[in-house]
Image (cartoon, coloured by chain):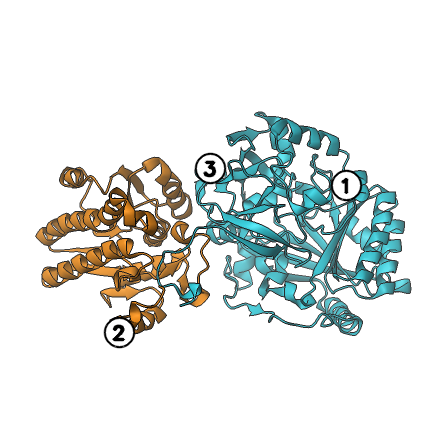
Chain colours: A cyan, B orange
């Protein structure tokens, strides 16, 4: 009988090597896979190993969560360790997902202080990537809301760190891509909310200048994000829709006849495997974008939308990463400083529109001041584009990288699958200090992902 | 109607999922573990997630002589007890190392049976209570790859069956759970067929439904396992002994 049908809870030794990738399904690499059992047993599991990186939900797009030799799954570290309803302070293990936190605490009137574009990420992943949300201009990244971390450093010792306790380890672990140590748990604050609804206001921007002005006008808004039609050219270059959001009060929801804490629909559509790479082509995306733009214009002013639609629209479509076919896709997310951004972004969007392979998923946001270390955000605008992984894309992205570097910007490591060392080094001035800390921690060669190897971290 | 649950084997992933389901329903939870420090994260989780009233107690399933006094010391006789104790052990090692084989058998059979038997007496005297034993499909038919573990579970299954039969008219229910494959610490790293493999939370839900809702006394968490085990059970021994299972 085949091993797969062995009829027991018993089985062979718990270790295997597989081809794995990030969410973009590019690149793929072989890695030994280990699974953590508990925070207590992790030091023994990692003892003596080299080339190891932790992997939470595998939602980093490129090769950040693919170990150079060994990838450690942290999904079993999924316990909540404490919650104080008076302050909203939550201590959660690294493998707890954002979806779990929202499901557990939104009905009790709490929402995470910062959420990225998907709820299928883990606490450890959010901190290692210092994820930002649609409120970065006001709230900073997720790391800004972390009070304390327990980090398993390469010496096998779990260390409690905070801003006033091992501050360097704390600062560099936030945004440190798992390369200073493995995050075991984190303490952070949830914010009280009166409902799970967002009052969304949609505004139309006819071109890039109008788009940037609309985003700038949202300085006082809680949330702000723009969808950009990256196939529009000429005078319409950079056109799109800007979505401003505010947490809706309880009374507003009740007056509108809404349950204050809506539950997302259970069934999710799933993209089937095996779609050809040309599913998203110039014609289909142009048609989609034109329709989407017109619909947004028609929708006009103000609407109450549930939290899951506002924050995590793509989570409703399971396995959407299959839309790009077997070769996978890359997401290019850059940030460029505010000063001179319009000229830089218009040059980049023009190149994208001319190549014409961009996906419908193009997002523009304002970012506030950065968090230091290898944290991605810096004061400016961030543009994210999804593109199929192929030679034309890579040539385009090399050109876009030159624009970003010339403007003094950088690329987001959690999305990266292909930037050059030069681009990376130009974008992250804290790199020497980060490398120095890794040396002192004995992390060189011990904690290593495909990304860190590729970028010479 | 929320009561008190005693979970024996509180560091077990299945046990934690069971406790979480009861905590969600508002039950008070008594967690028993050999190493309470290791079970602390599970106790914390129940409190943070469900605001459950949780107490953490030390109990070693191999120290059978301590059971009676330990039960006397409980804050209250529970309404439901779930035993999730289990040790897979190492079949190869157990073939030559009698001490290891003995520990696997004692952990899976002797300790849980004696403890639940003792609790059954107290439940019977009270005239109410639900006893849930997490056994295994591995106990349904001995196989070359894990028969020491399987034998322990087979003994446990038989003990639960007899207990159920004896107490049928006493107001005490006895439920046997054979979870099949479950994604837990015990099976981590194994390649498991998705259709036959349950998440711990499915086991938690199935146990709660069977114990508190009534219905079948012997449950396989995924229904397909009843069919699979019927097939396994029907294979004639001359054929079965030649299969590499």
Where residue B104 sits in the image (x, y, percent)?
A: 27, 48
Label 2 to label 1, Cα distance in Å? 73 Å
Q: What residue is pinned by disc 3?
A: A44
- Residue B123 shows in this picture: yes
Crowding at mark 3 (Cα within 10 Å: few <14, some 14-19, many 20+): few
The answer to whether mark 2 and mark 1 are in CB contact below 8 A is no
Residue at 30% x, 39% y: name it.
B56
Q: Is B116 on the left or on the right of B236, as rendered?
A: left
Classify residue A439 by image quadrant: top right
CA gap, disc 3 and disc 1:
42 Å
Asked if badges 2 and 3 are on one and the same chain, I answer no
In screen coordinates, is B24 left or right of A219?
Answer: left
Disc on res. B236: 2
Point out the frontmost of discs 3 and 1.
3
- Mark-to-mark CA distance, 2 and 3: 44 Å
Mark number displayed over residue A379:
1
The crowd level at tag 2 (other Cα within 10 Å; few <14, some 14-19, many 20+) is few
Secondary structure beneath dot 2 equals loop
């Amino acid at each position: 009988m085949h091993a797969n049908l062995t009829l027991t809870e018993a089985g062979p030794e718990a270790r295997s090597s597989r081809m794995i990738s990030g969410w973009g399904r590019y690149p793929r690499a072989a890695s030994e896979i280990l699974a953590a059992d508990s925070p207590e047993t992790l030091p023994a599991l990692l003892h003596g190993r080299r080339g190891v990186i932790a992997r939470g939900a595998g939602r980093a797009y490129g090769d950040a969560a693919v170990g150079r030799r060994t990838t450690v799954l942290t999904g079993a570290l999924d316990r909540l360790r404490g919650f104080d309803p008076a302050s909203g302070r939550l201590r959660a293990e690294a493998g707890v997902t954002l979806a779990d936190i929202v499901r557990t605490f939104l009905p009790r009137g709490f929402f995470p202080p910062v959420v990225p574009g998907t709820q299928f990420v883990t606490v450890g992943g959010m901190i290692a990537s210092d994820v930002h949300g649609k409120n970065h201009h006001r709230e900073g990244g997720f790391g800004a809301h972390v009070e304390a971390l327990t980090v398993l450093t390469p010496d096998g010792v779990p260390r409690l760190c905070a801003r006033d306790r091992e501050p360097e380890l704390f600062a560099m672990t936030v945004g440190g891509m798992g390369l200073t140590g493995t995050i075991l748990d984190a303490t952070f604050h949830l914010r009280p909310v009166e409902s799970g609804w967002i009052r969304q206001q949609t505004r139309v921007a006819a071109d890039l200048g109008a788009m940037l002005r609309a985003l700038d006008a949202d300085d006082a808004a809680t949330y702000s994000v723009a969808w950009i039609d990256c196939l529009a050219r000429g005078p319409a270059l950079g056109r799109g829709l800007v979505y401003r959001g505010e947490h809706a009060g309880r009374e507003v929801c009740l007056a509108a006849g809404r349950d204050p804490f809506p539950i997302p629909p259970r069934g999710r559509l799933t993209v089937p495997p095996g779609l050809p790479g040309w599913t998203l082509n110039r014609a289909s995306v142009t048609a989609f974008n034109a329709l989407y733009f017109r619909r947004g214009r028609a929708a006009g002013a103000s609407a109450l939308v549930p939290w899951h639609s506002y924050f995590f629209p793509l989570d409703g479509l399971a396995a959407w990463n299959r839309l790009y076919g077997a070769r996978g896709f890359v997401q290019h997310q850059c940030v460029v400083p505010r000063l001179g951004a319009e000229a830089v972004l218009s040059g980049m969007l023009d190149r994208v529109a001319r190549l014409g392979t961009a996906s419908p998923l193009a997002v523009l946001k304002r970012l506030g001041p950065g968090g230091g270390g290898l944290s991605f955000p810096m004061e400016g605008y961030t543009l994210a584009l999804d593109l199929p992984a192929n030679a034309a894309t890579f040539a385009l992205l090399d050109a876009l990288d030159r624009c970003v570097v010339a403007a003094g910007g950088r690329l987001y490591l959690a999305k990266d699958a292909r930037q050059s060392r030069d681009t990376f080094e130009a974008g992250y001035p804290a790199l020497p200090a980060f490398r120095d800390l890794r040396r002192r921690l004995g992390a060189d060669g011990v904690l290593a992902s495909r990304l860190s190897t590729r970028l010479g971290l | 109607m929320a009561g008190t649950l005693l979970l024996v084997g509180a560091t077990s992933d299945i046990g934690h999922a069971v406790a979480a389901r009861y905590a969600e329903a508002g039950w008070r939870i008594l967690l028993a573990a050999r190493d309470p420090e290791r079970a602390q994260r599970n106790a914390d989780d129940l409190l943070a997630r469900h605001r459950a009233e949780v107490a953490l107690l030390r109990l070693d399933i191999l120290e059978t002589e301590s059971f009676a006094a330990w039960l006397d010391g409980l804050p209250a006789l529970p309404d439901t007890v779930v035993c999730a104790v289990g040790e897979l052990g190492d079949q190869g090692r157990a073939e030559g190392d009698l001490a290891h084989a003995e520990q696997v058998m004692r952990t899976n059979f002797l300790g849980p049976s004696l403890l639940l038997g003792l609790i059954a007496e107290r439940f019977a005297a009270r005239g109410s209570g639900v006893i849930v034993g997490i056994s295994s499909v591995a106990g349904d038919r001995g196989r070359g790859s894990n028969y020491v573990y399987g034998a322990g579970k087979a003994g446990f299954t038989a003990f639960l069956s007899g207990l159920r039969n004896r107490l049928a008219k006493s107001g005490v229910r006895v439920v046997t759970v054979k979870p099949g494959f479950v994604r837990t610490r015990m099976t981590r790293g194994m390649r498991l067929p998705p259709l036959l493999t349950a998440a711990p939370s499915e086991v938690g839900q199935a146990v709660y439904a069977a114990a508190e809702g009534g219905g079948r006394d012997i449950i396989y968490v995924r229904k397909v396992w009843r069919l699979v085990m019927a097939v396994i059970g029907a294979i004639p021994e001359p054929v079965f002994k030649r299969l590499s299972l």
